[in-house]
Amino acid sequence: MNATPSNEAFWENHYARTVSSSSSAPLRPNDALVHLLATLDIRRGRALELGAGSGGDAVWLAEQGWQVTAADISATAIAQLGELANALGLSSNLHAVRHDLARSMPSASFDLVYACYLHTPVDIGRPGILRRVSDLMGVGGTLIVVDHASTAPWSWAHPDTRYPAPEQTYATIGLSDDWEPLLLTARERVATGPNGQTATVTDNLIVARRIDDAYAGRATV
Ligand SMILES: C[S@@+](CC[C@H](N)C(=O)[O-])C[C@H]1O[C@@H](n2cnc3c(N)ncnc32)[C@H](O)[C@@H]1O
């Protein structure tokens, strides 16, 4: 009987295959991220990406002038992204770091924390990760979560997978009263596959802003 691979082994295997098969494919930022940063008033500065993968979003953010920390559990993906940052002359503002976010995360403070498709076949306690990471942002900090609401035919995810609505995801994260939701919505986009094929998919967008950092103080008054 085959044992279920660990989360790390699953993603190492994934990137070992995709890095070798698509190393020449151009990296593109996610359409939802570009849309959100163009339409919402989001303070620029330091960004942390959770589960950065191949790094299309991290590279784009760095090119836009953000100081980016890109975290992922896959050593292969992180090594590849570090090499890419060097090759693109972005090594001063794009730092790729390996973290199993269920166990550790960067300790700096950030203006933006961004998680795009932080979906994985193993339960990593995602709501807790997103709640803990909210502590890395001060007042005015923004949390952006882009989730699947449906997936393309070439995705590793099972096509019958049901994804929670944005309001449900926001409630499950359980941010403190220091936070308010800015946007909880679904949005369609055209996804491009590894061989250039396309499919229309739906994303859930969850955007929240820290409006206060005195919740703990208020609670004891
Ligand atoms: C579905 S992929 C999304 C990758 C990328 N954000 C994108 O939009 O293409 C999920 C990513 O989360 C990473 N990941 C899964 N579990 C993780 C964990 N516990 N800590 C850090 N990264 C994790 C995987 O290695 C993978 O890169």
Image (tube, grey):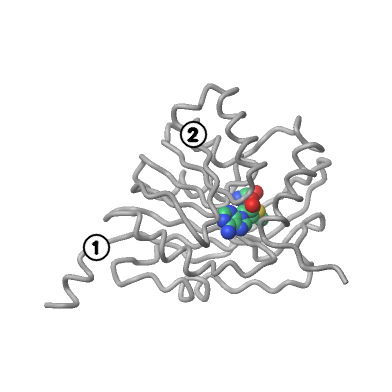
Instruction: Indicate the amino acid at tag 2.
Output: Leu
Q: How far apart are labels 1 and 2 at the CA level?
A: 28 Å
Please report the residue visible at 42 percent of the width from the left and 44 percent of the height from the top: 47
For the residues labelled 1 and 2, say whether their Cβ atoms are less than 8 Å apart: no
Mark 2 sits on what residue? Answer: 94
Horizontal side of residue 199 vs 205, given as left or right: right
Please report the residue visible at 80 percent of the width from the left and 68 percent of the height from the top: 3
Residue 99: percent from left, percent from top? 53, 51
Which quadrant would the C terminus be assigned to in this image?
Answer: bottom left
Instruction: State which mark lies toward you, 1 or 2.
Output: 2
Q: Element at badge 1?
A: loop
Above-or-below relation of 93 to 220 = above
Q: 124 and 25: which one is in front?
A: 124
Horizontal side of residue 45 vs 200, given as left or right: left
Compare marks 1 and 2 and give the one earlier in the sequence.
Answer: 2
Instruction: Indicate the amino acid at tag 1.
Output: Asp
